[in-house]
Amino acid sequence: MELRQVEYFLAVVEHEGIGGAAASLGVAQPTISQALRGLERELGVQLFHRIGRGMVLSAAGRSMVGPSRQILRDVTAVEDLLATADGELAGRLDVMAFPALVLGPLVDLVAEFRQAYPKVAVRFGELKSEAQAASLIEDGHCEFVVAHLPLDEDGLDVVELGEQEYWLVYPADTEVPDGPVPLSALPKVPMVFVPRGHSLADEIEEAIRHAGARPPLAVLSDHREARLPLVLAGIGGTLVERSIAESARDRAIVREVEPRFARRFGIAFDPETLSPVGRAFVELIRARGTGPQGN
């Protein structure tokens, strides 16, 4: 197996076909096709089902994605180390995080890590579904996932980083009493929610229903980041992360919720597959006094 074949294989996976892979790599499509067929012959398995012009991963292909990404990550780490004359840690820290959690403790960790290891680049990817945490690490998409707890550990180490509190935000002309607003006494103001099926959305909706409140629905949005702009546009109220709510105090009505609504969040990783950069990041996390948490 050649490194070039592994690169081509992952490019086809990520671009869902040979055409996109060839364009991204700047090589001819037949070159990639030939390399993949050679890899399949060498391994004695079919990595893709070829359906028309499409490429669909076989079971063997899916099982190869994670190890292939790990191979490339390890090779990149070695190349970066050799390119650094003084042996200083170099490479890339790959983190996928639930969007609302890319702030606070995580930002502090990354800032401290970059100060200690300035030759390490950091990539933040968007975690669209917290249920995917284990599979994303197993498939090699990233080394770390930051999400709300509990997580399906599935062999991962999980370190709690903090807590995310949720506050109410209403359009600026909404009449809302001062002080924390009981869930049982939510104003009869249309609300902006995300659809059920998101674990946090389910919890928020269930808490409101349990309190006996029935606010009317204004917008159901798959885009979590659209909630605050929709509120500022006067469409309705919503519950958002405290940091986001506080940033809008001068443009909206912001209130705490009673009872307090909050969720813990943490960072997950597989200690058996960490790169040198990943191990250094874990050492920093441990040094800050946090420890593994049960789910």
Image (cartoon, grey):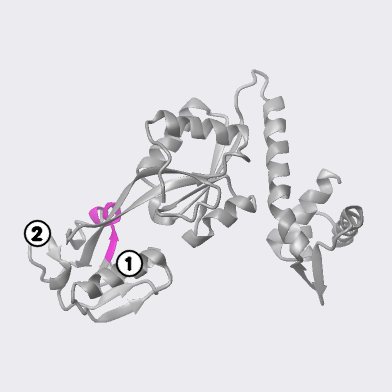
Q: Tell me, for residue 136, which label it has, or none.
A: none
Q: Is residue 65 visible?
A: yes
Q: Is residue 184 left or right of residue 24?
A: left
Identity of the residue drawn at 71% across and 31% down: 78
Q: Residues within 10 Å of mark 2 (few under 14, many from 20)?
A: few
Q: Is residue 168 left or right of residue 51?
A: left
Figure check: 2 above or below 178: above
Q: Quadrant of residue 231?
A: bottom left
Q: Is residue 23 visible?
A: no
Write the start and end of the magenta stretch as one range. Answer: 239-246
**Residue 11 in picture, x, y percent from top left:** 74, 56
Identity of the residue drawn at 39% across and 30% down: 288
**Which amino acid type is shown beneath numbered disc 1?**
Glu
Along the viewing direction, whichever of 62 and 6 lies nearer the viewer: 62
Disc 1 element: helix
Q: Which residue is mark 2?
A: 179
Q: Is residue 242 left or right of residue 107?
A: left
Along the viewing direction, whichever of 236 and 273 lies nearer the viewer: 273
N-term mark: 2 or 1: 2
Figure check: 79 above or below 3: above
**Which amino acid type is shown beneath numbered disc 2?**
Gly
Q: Quadrant of residue 196?
A: bottom left
C-alpha separation, residue under disc 2 versus residue under disc 1: 23 Å
Q: Quadrant of residue 49?
A: bottom right
Question: Does 163 appear in magenta?
Answer: no
Disc 2 element: loop
Between tags 2 and 1, which lies in front? 1
Q: Are marks 2 and 1 in contact (CB under 8 Å)?
A: no
Q: Which residue is mark 1?
A: 203
Q: Residues within 10 Å of mark 1 (few under 14, many from 20)?
A: some
Along the viewing direction, whichever of 160 and 247 lies nearer the viewer: 160
Give the residue at the far left of this rendering: 178
